[in-house]
Amino acid sequence: MSLPLTRRTLLLGSAATVLLGACATPWSAPPLPPIVFVHGNGDTAALWTTTLWRFESNGWPRERLHAIDIPYPLARDDDTKAQEGRSSTADNMAFLAAEIDRVLQATGARQVVLIANSRGGNAVRNYLANFGAPGSGASRVSHAILCGTPNHGVYADPKRNPNGEFNGAGPFLAGLNAPKGPNGDEVTPGVRWLTIRSDNNDKYAQPDGVWIGAKGVATNVTFEGPALKGAENAVIPGIDHRETAYSAKAFEQMFRFITGRSPASLAIVPEATVVLDGKLSGYFAYAAQGVVPTNLPLPGASVEIFATDPATGERLGPARHRRTVGADGRWGPFTGDAQTRYEFVIAAPGYATTHLYRSPFPRSSTIVNLRAEKLLDADKDAAAVVFLTRPRGYFGVPRDQIGLDGKSPPAGIPSGVAGVASAKLKLSDGVGRAVVGTFNDERLVGRTWPAANNELSYLELMY
């Protein structure tokens, strides 16, 4: 499928980004606008952590950066049919609308900027096109930035699950993409639009259906699927589906588009003391269909935090923080050190005891969201189970250097399009030893814990 000509398409390499300052109209005066960040399918607000840090490091007030949690983040299989534990397009639009109103009231601003990844962009487009009276949504929003949003579908086939939210030939996306105005634009007028996409490395903008379980079947979608007529369409070579939102290169385009100038730095400026907090969530259980993630609080769960030795993952003394989660799901606040590595221990009835090892947190955050995990039946025969996860991007081979317990790349990560964000290690012995995970310049060291005691280890990458 070939998209119509867009207002502006930018192919962004390392040299081109220097010249982008004149491509957007700058804000005439402070204060800087509040920004509402919307995550993708099955995700949490926590994925925006490093993006918020980069905005803060370039002078954006922390109180004007708002990342939201959709309570049920997974889309329905059929958008027209109720499905427990999942949300419809109307659910997401209503939740986003309430959050926009809350942010405008809290900040006193007249308009917000909306930045969304993947499915979050569907909520943004639906709000701007269909919320309330015509134009009422657009009057509250100055800029909309869609990162890797499958604007023309993950597939486009009127015969395949026609009411699926991600079907480019279905009524939801076809309605959003209906021509508007004299130029036949696909975007709602009155708002400045930017899309950010990969050149060919987005797993959900592929001509072949391999990433949606239909290898060899045409999706009727091209690499240009996230672009929109009437928007400025930025292309960043090599980035993957999540990196369209959570990478430093994506942040650079966001900042430039909103302010009209390049950020002073893509680096995260550290704070001497960091205060961390977040929500602890779990899963919605189906009787026969397994579990799906939620962003609902998990009251009664407990969190302990230990400082760890960066070389061995061993604990450096007793717990630095301990809390049982209440009705709001908050596990903090915890005052820590920007140079220290931490182990988060999560325990809850019906879940495995999860040992989560993290890199140092250079800045404070209130969206260090945690999720209690479950030990799969298929893994209960192991002595220990360790996961290496990358929430803000995928593992690409040969693009990235990835290692887990000395194996590079770990098993289960295919070559080609980056589309896997987790690697699993099942050990037949070796409980109570160090295990190392690496991703390019980031290195994590954790410990193995006995699966026989219903315990798991996660090495969660920050970048």
Image (cartoon, helix red, strand yellow):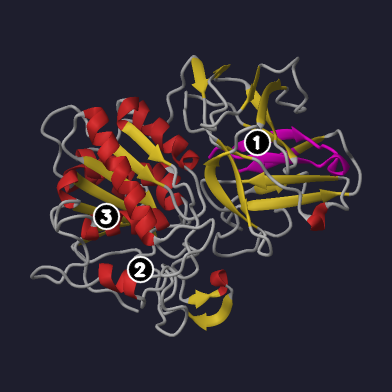
Q: Is 179 positioned to the left or the right of 326 in the image?
A: left
Q: Earlier in the sequence, mark 3 or mark 2?
A: 3
For the point 28% across and 35% down, the residue is 103
The answer to whether residue 153 is left or right of residue 326 is left
Q: Secondary structure at mark 1?
A: strand
Q: Earlier in the sequence, mark 1 or mark 3?
A: 3
Residue at horizontal 35 percent and vertical 64 percent from the top: 226
Nearer the viewer's eye, disc 3 or disc 2? 3
Judge whether residue 251 is colored magenta.
no
**Residue 447 falls inside the magenta stretch:** yes
The residue identified by callout 2 is 224
Disc 1: which residue? 443
Q: Amino acid at mark 3?
A: Tyr
Is 317 drawn above or below residue 425 in the view shown?
A: above
Seen from the viewer's position, the closer of residues 226 and 265 is: 226
Please state if 422 lies on the left or on the right of 84 as rendered.
right
Task: Name the N-terminal-most of marks 1 and 2.
Answer: 2
Please tell me which residue lies in front, 361 or 90. Answer: 90
- Quarter of the rendering containing residue 299: top right
The residues bearing labels 3 and 2 have C-alpha atoms spaced at a distance of 23 Å
**Residue 146, label in figure:** none
Give residue 5's quadrant in the image: bottom left
CA separation in Å, label 1 and label 3: 40 Å
Say what secondary structure mark 2 lies in.
Answer: loop
Placement of the N terminus among the 4 image quadrants: bottom left
Residue 39 appears anywhere in the view: yes
Around disc 2, counting alpha carbons within 10 Å, would you say few (fewer than 14), some (14 to 19), or many (20 or more)? many
The image position of residue 437, as x and y in percent, is 70, 41
Q: Secondary structure at mark 3?
A: helix
Q: Would residue 147 be visible to someone looking at this image? A: no
State the residue position of label 3.
127
Q: Amino acid at mark 1?
A: Arg
